Amino acid sequence: MSGLSRWAGLGALAIFLAALPQALPNNYYVDVAVLACFNAIICVGLNLLIGYAGQISLGHAGFFGLGAYASAVLVNSYGWPPLLALLAGAAIVGLMAFAIARPVLKLKGHYLAMATLGIGIIISIVINTEAGITGGPDGIAAGPFSIGSFKLAGERDWYWLMAGLLLATVWLATNLVDSPVGRALRALHGSEVGAEVVGVDTARYKVMVFVVSAVIASVAGSLFAHYTPQLTPTKADFFKSIELVTMVVFGGMASTFGAIVGAAFLTMLPQVLTVFEDYEPVILGGIMMGTMIFMPKGLVPTIAALFNRRRP
C-alpha cells in the first residue's frame, strides 16, 4: 500500500466513523457499533500475525481475556486506577507472549494451530477455575473507566473512544506493514526458508509480530472489561478465538481494512438475522460458506480485484 493510498484509506475510515453515530437511531445500535470496534481492533492486530506473517493462532481470545481480567482484578480487588491497570495488563500479556512465542512459533502448520489452541484453552480453564480471583463462571465487574475525575458514561462516549483507538490501531498496522518490518513479514509468509536465505531473522520477526498482536488484544480486553457490566470467561474461550479468526479470513487476510470489514460485518450480521429466529445459524453459515466459495481471498481483496479489472 502506497503512502497516498494509506492516508486516503485512513481518511475515509475517519470520515465514516465520524458520520456513523449520526445515522444510528438509538443506543442499541451504538452498542453494536462499539462491539464492532472492539472486534475490529483485535482483528487488525491478529491480521498482522495471520495475514502478513502467515502464523496461525487459535487462542488469541486468551490474550483478550487476560487483558480484561487483569484490569478487572487490579481495579476491583486492589483499587488500581483503570489506566494503570490497562498498562499493567498489556505489560503482563506482552511478557507472556514473548516467553511462549519462541518455542511455539518454531512449529508450523497444524502443529502451530494445535499449540496456540492449547494456550487459549489453558488460559480459559485458569480463568474459570480460579474463582477466588476471577469470580469463576459468574465473572467479575470492573466498574466504569475513568482517568482522574473524567468517567466514560454511556454508549456514545465509548463509541468515540473506541473509534479513536481503532484509527490509531489501523495507523500503527499500516505503517508497520509498509516499513521494512512489513516487507520482512511478507517474505516470511511467502517462504520462511527463502526469507532466511536473503538475511531475514525469521524467529525475531515472528516473535515481534506475535507480541504486538497479543498486546493489541490485551488493550482491547482491558477496555472491554470496563464497558461490559459483567465480564465472564466466555470472552476468552475457544469459540471467541474461532470467531476472531473467521472475521480476519472473511474480510480478507493480509488486508488491514479487510479485517475491519470482516469484524464489522460478522458483528452486525447476527443482529440483523435475529428476525429469522431458529433459522439464524443456518442463514449465517450459508452466507459465510458462499462467501468463501466465491470469494476465497476474502471480501475486500475480491471486491478490490473486481474494481481494478473494470477500471479503464
Image (tube, rainbow, N blue to C red):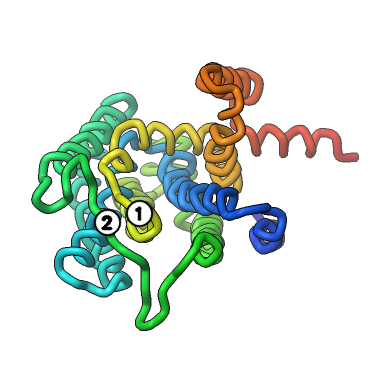
Q: Is residue 241 visible?
A: yes
- Residue identifier under label 1: 229
Nearest the viewer among 31 and 57 is: 31
Q: CA distance from mark 2 to mark 1?
A: 6 Å
Residue at the image point whose x is 25% and y is 51% from the top = 66
Nearest the viewer among 253 and 23 is: 23
Q: Earlier in the sequence, mark 2 or mark 1?
A: 2
Tag 2's secondary structure? loop
Residue 60 image position (x, y, % from top left): 33, 42
| Horizontal relation, residue 68 to residue 37: left or right | left
Residue 247 image position (x, y, % from top left): 50, 36
- Residue identifier under label 2: 141
Q: For residue 265, what is the image quadrant?
A: top right
Residue 51 image position (x, y, % from top left): 48, 40
Graded by Cα atoms within 10 Å as few (under 14), some (14 to 19) or many (20 or more), the crowding at tag 2 reads many
Pointers 2 and 1 in contact (C-beta within 8 Å): yes
- Amino acid type at circle 2 is Ala
Nearest the viewer among 212 and 183 is: 212
**Residue 50 in the image: above or below residue 175:** above
Residue at the image point whose x is 23% and y is 47% from the top = 139
Residue at the image point whose x is 65% and y is 37% from the top = 301
